Amino acid sequence: LPLLTSCCPGWVNFFEHQFPELLHMPSSAKSPQQMFGSIAKSYYAEKMGLKPSDIVVVSIMPCLAKKYEAARPEFCHDGVKDVDFVLSTRELASMIKEAGVMFASLKDEDYDDPLGESTGASIIFGASGGVLEAALRTANDILTGEDIKEIDFVAIRGLEGIKEATVTVAGQELKVAVCSGLGNARKLLTQIRDGKANYHVIEIMACPGGCINGGGQPYTGSDLGTLEKRKEAIYEADRSFTLRKSHLNPSIQKLYKEYLGEPGSQLAHKLLHTRYFAK
């Protein structure tokens, strides 16, 4: 302990270079981007009768480091990348403007869902504290065997660089921390390395405030008001979902039943997990 989150590629690159002695701490779980690419070119390819090389996965992200992540050699198999191209939200906005698309004049319609629906837990990944909160929601249910109704972990939300809290999961108190910004990450990891900090789980994001302030997002300068609005929009979207816990997503349940087997199975580990390297 502690267990460190691993879905932010900027943070992954940082700890591989700066704290190689702590490589045993980050979760082996791939980021959502790389999980999607891996599943699209295995499970989805088989369902559609396609070769992995016939599928092009384009990821739209608030993060420029996602481009680097998609190019990591461990995410390429037999010359086929799990994620072929990554566009930032800012790049996509420019393309939409250049194409003259006017969203205000378009009719609303449901998006395509080749791999199923989403949950509120996935939405909150974009705000600092959201990854940890999503994990705590699921951990609480699994460890208690109940459908816990109180699922908002407000203590770990917010734009502060380092947030600490003690949360109760299945009757057990866990000391957790949420960190955004690599300067803050360095402070926290130095304390851990020196034995001066004691946590069970830490979420770390490279960008201050999390992905809502990602390097690929539309520029805000130093306008914290815009970040606050983005954060509030994310939690409002979460509240609008009927399903707000990842493990209750029927599409995920179907994926495990039809293809992956049990969580932690050999196939699940192959497709959904990765390794890190001292650099």
Image (cartoon, grey):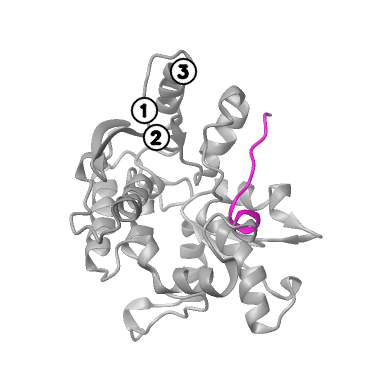
Q: Position of residue 150 (x, y in %)?
A: 18, 54
Quadrant containing the C terminus is: top right
- Where residue 175 sits, quadrant-wise, is top left
Comes first in the chain, label 2 or label 3: 3
Foreground: disc 1 or disc 2: 1
Position of 14 relative to 106 (above/below): above
- Residue 276 inside the magenta-drawn segment: yes
Foreground: disc 3 or disc 1: 1
| Residue at the spot 22% in from the left edge and 54% down from the top edge | 151
Foreground: disc 2 or disc 3: 2
**Three-letter code for the amino acid on which mark 3 is drawn:** Thr
- Residue 113 inside the magenta-drawn segment: no
Range shown magenta: 269-278
**Three-letter code for the amino acid on which mark 1 is drawn:** Tyr
| Residue at the spot 39% in from the left edge and 77% down from the top edge | 102
**Three-letter code for the amino acid on which mark 2 is drawn:** Ile
Image mark for residue 202: 2
Tell me whether the residue at label 1 lies in contact with that at label 2, contact meaning CB atoms closer than 8 angstroms: yes
In the image: residue 192, left or right of residue 87: left
Q: What is the CA distance from the residue labelled 3 to the residue labelled 1?
A: 13 Å
Q: What is the CA distance from the residue labelled 2 to the residue labelled 3?
A: 13 Å
Q: Position of residue 28 (x, y in %)?
A: 56, 44
Front residue of 262 and 42: 262
Name the residue beneath numbered marker 1.
199
Q: Position of residue 218 (x, y in %)?
A: 41, 53
Image mark for residue 190: 3
Q: What is the CA distance from the residue labelled 1 to the residue labelled 2?
A: 7 Å
